[in-house]
Every structure is written in C-alpha cells, then in structure tokens.
Image (cartoon, rainbow, N blue to C red):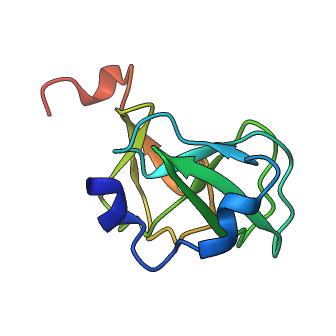
Amino acid sequence: MMAHTLLKGKQIPDAKEAHMNHALVVNSNDNVANALDDIPAGEQFAFSVGTDACTLTAADNVKFGFKVAIRKIRKGEQIIKYGCVIGVASQDIEPGQCVHIHNVEGTRGRGDKKGE
C-alpha cells in the first residue's frame, strides 16, 4: 500500500496505544493531515492511515483545523488532502511542519492559471 512507503520510518510501534488521534488523514494518498486539536511544536501527535497507527513530532505550532505534513513534500510537489490536489509546495516541507499559505501555492479556483 502506498501509505506504507510514504510513512516508512515514521511509524512508532506503540502508536496504537495512543488514546486518540490528534490529526485526521482521510485518504491513504494524502501527504497532509488535518489537526483535530492545537498541536504545539515539539509535541508528538497521533494519526491513522488506513489501519496503521502513526505518530510524528510537530516541527511547528499547528493550529486546530490547519494541515500538517505527514511525510517530506518537495518544492513543486502536489499537496494532497482528502485524496485531492489542493495546491503545490512552494518550498520543501518536512514531516511535522504546518502546511499553509507560507509554503503552498493554491491551484484551485485560480483564473490566472487557466491554460497552464
């Protein structure tokens, strides 16, 4: 399954013992999760990809409802949330970093991008 490759080396065996997920991944192709709580920088957070329980350490403060990278996303790579492309990384994004307007160029609803 693709999620295993994306998260290889990022899974922690005791993650299944976590009481609840702090972030939501809807589709196994997603490279971001949505924060279900405020996640302070340096704090571990739990999320699931399919039946796999995972944890990462937040590199940034991630506010409730914001996106957080669950794997390395290279500059120019598509940001995938809910199985859909929502933008392109404007810089390299490390796992655990907040994914927002400072490191993403939106591609949806962009009239200036028609025909490109």
**Position of residue 105 measured from the top left corner of the image (x, y, whole percent):** 44, 45
The quarter of the picture where the C terminus appears is top left
Q: Residue at x 36, y 24 (%)?
A: 110
Which of the 4 quarters of the picture holds residue 107? top left
Nearer-the-camera pick, 44 or 42? 44
Q: Is residue 103 above or below residue 85?
A: below
Nearer-the-camera pick, 102 or 74? 74
* Residue farthest bottom in this picture: 9
Q: Is residue 57 above or below residue 19?
A: below
Q: Is residue 103 above or below residue 92?
A: above
**Position of residue 113 measured from the top left corner of the image (x, y, whole percent):** 26, 30
Which of the 4 quarters of the picture holds residue 102? bottom right
* Residue farthest left in this picture: 115
**Position of residue 46 measured from the top left corner of the image (x, y, whole percent):** 70, 57
Q: Is residue 55 above or below residue 34?
A: below
Q: Residue at x 55, y 69 (%)?
A: 95
Q: Residue at x 41, y 36 (%)?
A: 27
| Position of residue 30 in the picture relative to residue 69 (left or right) | left
| Position of residue 52 in the picture relative to residue 16 (left or right) | left
